[in-house]
């Protein structure tokens, strides 16, 4: 086997593994150390219950990693977030982290196309005593965002917005929610390193799902890097998280 071909096959195997684990660290042992040392010991019992429930679901690859969710929880507290939005909910693991982090009178506008998934986690969210903070809307997010943009009372009102939905629409989400987050507020986009595929040659071997969304992720990353209305920080936690702080 030619060295170049062998290298490509090794990269393809790495991409496949990353797509399963959503962990960019090169050592599984190191990642487990992080989880067992500083994440799991402080994880709320209802978060653990929801995480374990979701791991049994056929689409559990959509579950946010515990260290990423813990990081976002800390961020919410640091910026004193109260009015938040989440686009892409799944069973509500990261949503529950948010609900536990914001004040008792805080609010989360949560959007997802699948209420069934959300209702899997809802009993655990209710058990945690934070369901009253969540306004769940079923359906595509873009039409609702368009409605909100038409009403100026929503402009600049959100402290934090988290997007973990269809990657081919990230640019469309950004065009809208930049008007809704306040100046000084933060937007977080998940999966912006897309299993590391953003850094491999276009002809590298990868599965069809990775390849299809890779170009959308690359386009989005380039667009936000050039957006003068925000400051950005690209984090290598989980599958890549891009934080955008609105400055104008």
Image (spheres, helix red, strand yellow):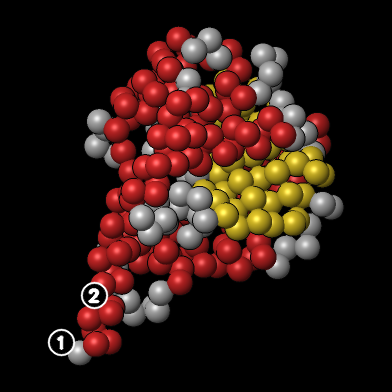
Residue 184: x and y, percent?
Answer: 80, 44
At 70% from the left edge and 68% from the top edge, which residue is drawn?
226
Q: Mark 2 — residue? A: 9
Residue at x 31% of width, y 71% of height:
11
95 horizontally vs 119: left or right: right
- Of the 4 image quadrants, the one containing the N terminus is bottom left
Residue in the image at 78% along x and 63% along y: 228
Looking at marks 1 and 2 on the same chain, the residue that comes earlier in the sequence is marked by: 1
For residue 119, above or below residue 67: above
Badge 1 element: loop
Residue topped by disc 1: 1
Q: Depth check: 199 or 221 in front?
A: 199
Q: 231 or 68: nearer the eye?
A: 68
**Residue at the extreme bottom of the image, as rendered:** 2
Coordinates of residue 202 in the picture (x, y in percent): 39, 78
Using a 10 Å C-alpha cutoff, classify the residue at mark 1 as few (fewer than 14 neighbours), some (14 to 19) or many (20 or more). Answer: few
Asked which quadrant contains residue 201, the reply is bottom left
Query: Residue 46 appears at what percent x and percent y?
Result: 43, 18
Q: Are marks 1 and 2 in contact (CB under 8 Å)?
A: yes
Q: Is label 2 in a helix, a strand or a loop?
A: helix
Q: Residues within 10 Å of mark 2 (few under 14, many from 20)?
A: some
Camera-side residue of 101 and 225: 101
Q: Is residue 237 visible?
A: yes
How far is the residue under mark 1 from the one under mark 2? 10 Å
Residue 107 x/y as whole percent? 66, 22
Which label was assigned to residue 56? none
User: Image height check: is 142 above or below 26?
Assistant: above
Check the image and report above or below for 180 versus 192.
Answer: above
Is residue 142 at all visible to an observer of this figure? Answer: no
Locate residue 102 relative to residue 202 in the image: left or right: right
């Amino acid at each position: 086997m030619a060295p170049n071909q062998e290298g490509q096959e090794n990269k393809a195997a790495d991409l496949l593994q990353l797509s399963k684990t959503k962990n960019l660290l090169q050592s599984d042992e190191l990642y487990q150390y992080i989880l067992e040392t500083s994440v799991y010991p402080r994880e709320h019992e209802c978060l653990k219950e929801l995480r374990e429930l979701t791991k049994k679901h056929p689409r559990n690859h959509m579950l946010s990693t515990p260290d990423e969710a813990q990081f976002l929880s800390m961020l919410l507290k640091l910026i004193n977030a109260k009015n938040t939005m989440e686009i892409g909910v799944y069973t509500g693991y990261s949503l529950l982290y948010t609900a536990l982090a914001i004040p008792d009178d805080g609010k989360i506008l949560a959007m997802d196309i699948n209420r069934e998934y959300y209702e899997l986690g809802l009993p655990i969210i209710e058990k945690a005593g934070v369901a009253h903070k969540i306004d769940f809307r079923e359906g595509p997010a873009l039409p609702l965002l368009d409605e909100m943009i038409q009403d100026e009372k929503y402009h600049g009102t959100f402290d934090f917005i988290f997007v973990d939905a269809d990657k081919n629409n990230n640019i469309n989400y950004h065009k809208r929610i930049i008007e809704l987050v306040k100046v000084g507020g933060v937007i977080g986009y998940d999966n912006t390193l897309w299993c590391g595929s953003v850094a491999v040659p276009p002809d590298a071997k990868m599965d069809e799902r990775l390849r299809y969304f890779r170009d959308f992720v690359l386009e989005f990353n380039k667009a936000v890097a050039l957006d003068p209305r925000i400051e950005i920080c690209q984090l290598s936690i989980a599958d890549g998280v891009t934080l955008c702080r609105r400055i104008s």
